[in-house]
Image (cartoon, rainbow, N blue to C red):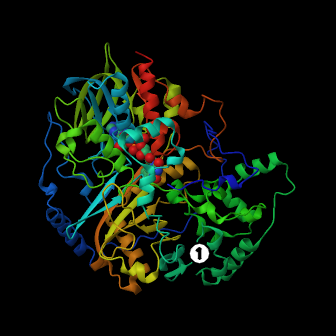
Amino acid sequence: MLKRALLHLLKNAPPIGPAPKWQARLSSGPQFTEGPVLTKPPKTPSGLNIPIERRDFIHGSGLLGLGLGLESRALSSTEGVLHPPTYPPSLTGLRGSHPGSFEAAHAFARGGLALANPKQDVDHFDAVIVGAGISGLAAAHYYRQQFGNDKRILILDNHDDFGGHAKRNEFHQGGRLHLAIGGTHNLEYWQFSHTVNELMGLLGVDIKSLRAQSEFNYGRTGRHAHSIWFDRQTYGRDQLIKGCSLKGPPSASPLPYLDQFPISAAARQELKQFYEAKTDCLADMTADARSDFLHGTSYFHFLRDKGGLGKEALQLFARSCHGSWGLETACLSVAEALGEGLPGLNLVGESADESDWSYPAAFFPDGNASIARLLVAHLIPKITDQADATTIATAPFDYQYLDQPGHPVRIRLLSTVTDVRHTDQSVSTTYIADGKPRQVRSTHVIMACYHSVIPYICPELPERQKQAQAYQIKYPLMLTNVLIRSRQPFDLLGIDGTTCPGRMHAGLFLMNGINTGGYRHHLTEPGATVVAFWGSLSPPSTAVDLRSQLRASRQRMLDLSFEDYEIEVREVLNGLLGNHGFDADRDILAITVNRWPHGYSHEYLDLWDDDYPAGQAPHEIARARYGQIAFANSDAGASAYTHTAIEEAFRAVTSLASST
Ligand SMILES: Cc1cc2nc3c(=O)[nH]c(=O)nc-3n(C[C@H](O)[C@H](O)[C@H](O)COP(=O)(O)OP(=O)(O)OC[C@H]3O[C@@H](n4cnc5c(N)ncnc54)[C@H](O)[C@@H]3O)c2cc1C
């Protein structure tokens, strides 16, 4: 996640603090300018089915070639609870919110799921944790630290893998393991608190050595660090313009390249005047008025009214923040958009520095999935005999140990929690596994799932707390990883990534150069490589306010089939690389679509949220301990980061300790 790097440039703008607006200005916010229409090509173009079969073959044989043989190992069934029949990280197709992970929750929330007579689990646990993301796993660690290593903990998650957004994608091809990031990427270490640093120390994560071993920089490592790819369906012709960016440092300004943009002459002229301007259109304002303007004005209105851009020029920027925010750019204020690196500082008397674009990165090759794996190895040592931070990326994990009777920590996957409530002596948790309701009792429950689902699950919570939890609507995100046969076409073009203002995924980059955790894939290594397509999904133009946009975008993401995503990546790769020896039929080896309808936590936005006194912001009300139930997850910190997920786990466990 790459975000808000340039906020300090807005000298007169105060930091964007939490500013929730409860009953939000949902109808009085800015009108959205629709991005380019997403055209859905005809189904089943020629050759589409052939590579899928070949990919499956390559995929399976690669595993055997590595000697892992994990595909064939069906995981055990524990007390009637089914576990995934395969090794989940190596599954391709629709991942993230994969089929089978969300249907029970949706059916339950819509009242269509019978939960009568749940089967009672024989075990009583000290803590049940709902959600096996980073926050739930960290909560298990803190719980043991707080209450003792002998405490019995059950972690329930609706997915077939642990980690939540910390999702590991594996591809096996030609006897080689290719790792990719399916969700959370970067350790934003400069924001780490003492608590987070301490946990990283315990897990052996050394940021300095991660940084020293990594060459990855979101595809900005080719001969041409910046480029824009205009596609035929949206702009009339396929055209890669190298050397410039719509959201980049001064040296990548599009100004010298505008004549090449496949848009109308009028739109080019508007952009030319906009980029050439050097003025301060707010010069007459007091500091307060200036700040109000920057934080209270929609960026798109600013581009239109102060920058002179019409609809055609505006649409170029519509999806620029899909990856970094999971939002349409039209949702952002001027301050947020300029802070993000979008153009316009030149209209408010400011200028950016080249160095503002150097973004510190500390990566494992599967992103923060390695943090999840380190946590699991710490909680359940038997799962791997090799895992420390220097080997975690390639350490084999034996999933049969996740849920073993007799072990103090158990992780039960494919288990959707539907009801949590206090009983006489304990808390009872009902969950659905294999289509059937089951019930387990514990002294404590920690809800480490996203907050908007909690009001459905915890009926006894005060209404105010439920409303606060429902306020947290996450931003949808997609990370589609495509294994291609060779990186040579990228080398011929001189790029390691590009942005695609007209396409479903707003950007793509080669996922290589992360040589950490015992894994090596050097930046320029020839041969097969993973291309990561990154972005969100634009909502239909009928959704005009933030929340209806987020809901519509989420639904759209779930409605698309794997084939829709496959068609999209084939078209993009053929259009971008087709003249340089790439042929999707031959060269795409595997596709893993990580869709995250519930992606980034809601961070308070200038245009959509209000100021709240300390302690009264929705996330603060939402996370208050209720009896023996505590609330973790990055939602509890209203901040979409791995370190927030950890901090909130710590806070949640500490709140339970104060209640005993
Ligand atoms: C694509 C993407 C990229 C990101 N990039 C970064 C990054 O680079 N750096 C960074 O710091 N952060 C990043 N993030 C933010 C990320 O959300 C956090 O870093 C962190 O992973 C959140 O962890 P969590 O445990 O709070 O939530 P989650 O990972 O969402 O875990 C919660 C778990 O609870 C499960 N759950 C929900 N309801 C139920 C139920 N009823 N029963 C059982 N289980 C349930 C969920 O399915 C999920 O598995 C990214 C997020 C996404 C989606």
Give above or below for 44 relative to 112. below
Task: Tally the marks.
Answer: 1
The residue sitting at 25% across, 42% down in the picture is 414
Furthest residue in direction right, as rendered: 284
Horizontal side, residue 338 vs residue 411: left or right: right
Horizontal side, residue 55 vs residue 183: left or right: left
User: Which residue is at the front of the view, 551 or 516?
Assistant: 516
Give above or below for 419 relative to 235. above
Ligand 1, image quadrant it occupies:
top left
Q: In the rendered image, which quarter contains the C terminus?
A: top left
Instruction: Locate residue 578, reporting x and y percent.
Output: 39, 83
Instruction: Locate residue 173, reporting x and y percent.
Output: 23, 68
Which amino acid type corresponds to the residue marked 1 in the rendered image? Cys
User: Which residue is at the front of the view, 245 or 380?
Assistant: 380
Image quarter of residue 235: bottom right
Instruction: Locate residue 75, reporting x and y percent.
Output: 15, 46
Give above or below for 339 relative to 381. below
Label 1 crowd bin: few (<14), some (14–19), many (20+), radius 10 Å: many
The residue sitting at 63% across, 38% down in the picture is 21
The residue tagged 1 is 244
User: Which residue is at the front of the view, 416 or 515?
Assistant: 515
Give above or below for 511 relative to 268. above
Instruction: Locate residue 232, reporting x and y percent.
Output: 48, 80
Give the SS element for disc 1: loop
